């Protein structure tokens, strides 16, 4: 039989060990749930206050001075989607610049919203750089006033970001976008998301301008070949070149879709079934140049409507001949809730 002193010592040791284990678990949980901090970039607090406020109250820090009704710690800075009508929310945290250069920040929301940043990282110095008046479509950063002026950041720099949003009624959403220098993507994408190039660009040098359907170099190894985010040629294709763009596109809904071609000089677009590549669903052709982003108005520039089911894939191929001048070729699509000019690679969340 052990002495009372031995038994007491064992109990004390057990308590110390248990405290260390539980303390470790608590500290791990605390770290997992820790809120935003300059040392934890891309960790955001999403705070919600139930109740209605006027749009101008979003610019007053006092609106967010009381204890929030709900707080979530998130790595993707998007608004909550289960709050009903009549609330105010704020998303705040720090981001880390992946490269040195000029960034642009943007905001999309339904209803009103403002975006503040502090490039040097001090949240007390955050200033409004963009806003939404009324509403936008989800992740649509193209409206007036929605995008900041260029903001120069150094690689590794921690920049404070804060989005303030109010909902009145109906649908609601909130997202923050940024345009990252030298990313190959010349538009804002939502913070916490990535765009992987889905299309292939190829080019052949020293090819005189001609009808692209009769160019035989497309059977040879290209002089240049790389993946691109948009179904369009890069801006530096040169002169007297033949180019080819290929890739697949997936219909987001049932309905009829029209594909359109923009090019300088000559170009041919083929839309084929992904299941049966011998099946030509539609085509478009340009026998003369258009301005960049000029999508309609020329004979044969747009395909006839092509019926597609949700999830249905098509294969797209553009053959293009460029003589003198800057040159370009691109493909767009319009249909149910879709207007992409040019077609672009899908956006994915980093955690998906």
Image (cartoon, helix red, strand yellow):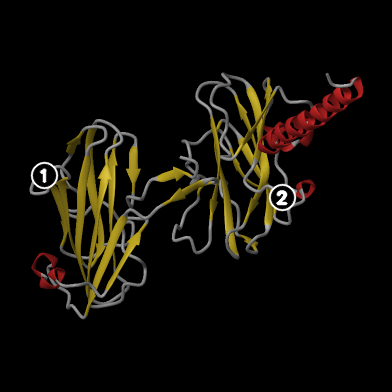
**Snapshot quadrant of residue 327:** bottom left
In the picture, measured across the screen, residue 25 lies left or right of residue 307, that is right
Pointer 2 residue: 39
Residue 276's disc is 1
Give 223 or 35, whichever is nearer the viewer.
Answer: 35
Give 10 or 27, whichever is nearer the viewer.
Answer: 10
275 in relation to 52, above or below: below
Q: How many marks?
A: 2
Q: Nearer the viewer, mark 1 or mark 2?
A: 2
Q: Position of residue 243 (x, y in %)?
A: 23, 68
Callout 2: helix, strand or loop?
loop
215 in relation to 49, above or below: below
Q: Are marks 1 and 2 in contact (CB under 8 Å)?
A: no
Residue found 57% across the figure and 32% down from its top: 79
Residue found 73% across the figure and 56% down from its top: 120
Is tag 1's residue or tag 2's residue first in the polypeptide sequence? 2
Give the farthest residue toward the front.
1
Q: Residues within 10 Å of mark 1 (few under 14, many from 20)?
A: few
What is the CA distance from the residue labelled 1 to the residue labelled 2?
52 Å
Callout 1: helix, strand or loop?
loop
In the picture, measured across the screen, residue 274 lies left or right of residue 111, that is left
Give 203 or 35, whichever is nearer the viewer.
Answer: 35
Q: Position of residue 347 (x, y in %)?
A: 42, 45
Q: Position of residue 287 (x, y in %)?
A: 15, 63
């Amino acid at each position: 039989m052990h002495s009372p002193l031995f038994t007491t010592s064992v109990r004390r040791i057990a308590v110390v060990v248990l405290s260390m284990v539980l303390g470790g678990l608590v500290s791990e949980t605390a770290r997992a749930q820790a809120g935003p901090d300059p040392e934890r970039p891309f960790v955001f607090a999403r705070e919600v206050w139930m109740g209605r406020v006027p749009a101008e109250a979003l610019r007053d820090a006092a609106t967010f001075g009381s204890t929030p009704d709900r707080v979530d710690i998130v790595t993707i800075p998007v608004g909550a989607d289960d709050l009903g009508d009549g609330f105010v929310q704020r998303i705040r945290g720090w981001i880390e610049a992946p490269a040195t250069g000029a960034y642009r920040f943007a905001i999309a929301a339904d209803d009103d919203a403002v975006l503040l940043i502090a490039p040097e990282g001090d949240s007390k110095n955050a200033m409004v750089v963009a806003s939404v008046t009324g509403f936008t479509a989800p992740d649509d950063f193209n409206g007036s006033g929605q995008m900041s002026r260029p903001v120069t950041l150094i690689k590794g720099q921690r920049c404070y970001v804060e989005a303030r949003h109010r909902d009145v009624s109906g649908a609601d959403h909130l997202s923050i976008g940024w345009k990252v220098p030298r990313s190959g993507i010349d538009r804002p994408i939502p913070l916490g998301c990535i765009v992987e190039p889905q299309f292939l660009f190829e080019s052949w040098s020293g090819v005189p301008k001609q009808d692209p359907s009769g160019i035989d170099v497309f059977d040879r190894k290209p002089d240049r070949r790389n993946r691109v985010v948009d179904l369009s040629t890069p801006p530096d294709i040169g002169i007297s070149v033949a180019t080819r763009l290929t890739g697949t596109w997936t219909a987001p809904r049932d309905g009829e879709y029209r594909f359109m071609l923009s090019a300088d000089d000559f170009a041919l677009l083929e839309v084929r079934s992904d299941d049966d590549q011998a099946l030509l669903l539609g085509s478009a052709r340009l026998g003369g140049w258009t301005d960049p982003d000029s999508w309609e108005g020329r004979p044969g520039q747009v395909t006839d409507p092509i019926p597609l089911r949700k999830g249905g894939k098509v294969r797209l191929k553009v053959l293009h001949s460029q003589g003198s001048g800057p040159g370009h070729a691109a493909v767009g699509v319009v249909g149910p809730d879709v207007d992409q000019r040019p077609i672009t690679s899908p956006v994915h969340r980093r955690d998906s």
